[in-house]
Image (spheres, helix red, strand yellow):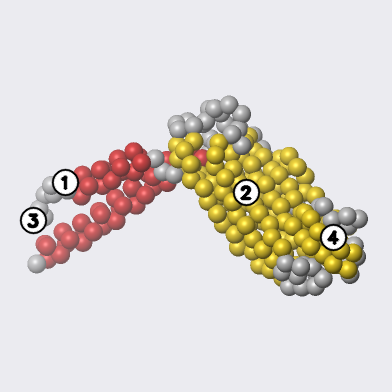
Amino acid sequence: MCRLTLWKGDHVMRFRAIVVFSVLVCSIGANSVSAQLFSGPSSFTMAPATGAPNSQFLNNLTLTDLANGFSVSGQVQIDVTAGQHSGTLLSWEVERPLNPLFTPPMTMVNTSSLTGYIIAPASAGSDYGQITTEYTATPSMAIGTFSYSGGVQTQLNVSQTATFPYTAGGVNFLRQAYFVNYNFNVPAGTYVLDFPADSLSDPLPEPTTCVTAAILTGGLLNRPRRRRR
């Protein structure tokens, strides 16, 4: 009875170790490719701006490169003058160059992520906005939409993905486009918009890599074992 119990315990330990090995093989394969995806830093191709006329615009946004994309973080405050007007409250675009030598062809996942909040004055009506993440030369758009209401703080928690086949080559960029609209009536008021807004791009694990790991796992588990004496 003791021999059987010992063998089962050893078998379970081997199984757990091999499963961990398989997961690591898949994740390391994806991460090593991700590090080669970009050929340079990100930059604003359209600086943050407001379409609200005669407004005071305080911009504390910063742009930070990540291993798999970039993040726009910080806060914007927009003091809107009295009157009745509407349009684009805030917008920008960011691009980061993709490496044309990125290999091999892979299935990629783009993610648009937006958290933070919007505080709108009581005289503001409800409105909406959008964040997109895409490759400029490849159909790959991940579109996240959101809405907010006047006179309250609206918490944002947006995350949308797009999965697509990708083969590197030529001029291509990871692009983030952000905008939010507004409609405003009579008294002056202040909008506060808090971020981050992230654009991320990650490869799916190579099927061949994971299949190989699975075959190795099965082979190791089924390997004949010497009985304990």
Which amino acid, mark 4?
A: His
Which amino acid, mark 3?
A: Arg
Find disc 2 in the rendering and name its residue.
Answer: 132
Mark 3 neighbour density, 10 Å: few (under 14) some (14–19) many (20 or more): few
Find disc 1 in the rendering and name its residue.
Answer: 223
Which amino acid, mark 2?
A: Thr
Which amino acid, mark 1?
A: Arg
What residue sits 51% from the left and 40% below the top?
A: 34
| Left/right of residue 156 with respect to residue 101 in the rendered view | right
Q: CA distance from mark 4 to mark 3?
A: 87 Å
**First in sequence: mark 4 or mark 2?**
4
Q: Nearer the viewer, mark 1 or mark 4?
A: 4
**Of helix, strand and loop, which one carries label 4?**
strand
What residue sits 57% from the left and 31% below the top?
A: 99
Q: Is residue 192 above or below residue 96?
A: below
**First in sequence: mark 2 or mark 3?**
2
Query: Disc number at residue 85?
Result: 4
Q: Position of residue 168 (x, y in %)?
A: 52, 30
Find disc 3 in the rendering and name its residue.
Answer: 229
Mark 2 neighbour density, 10 Å: few (under 14) some (14–19) many (20 or more): many
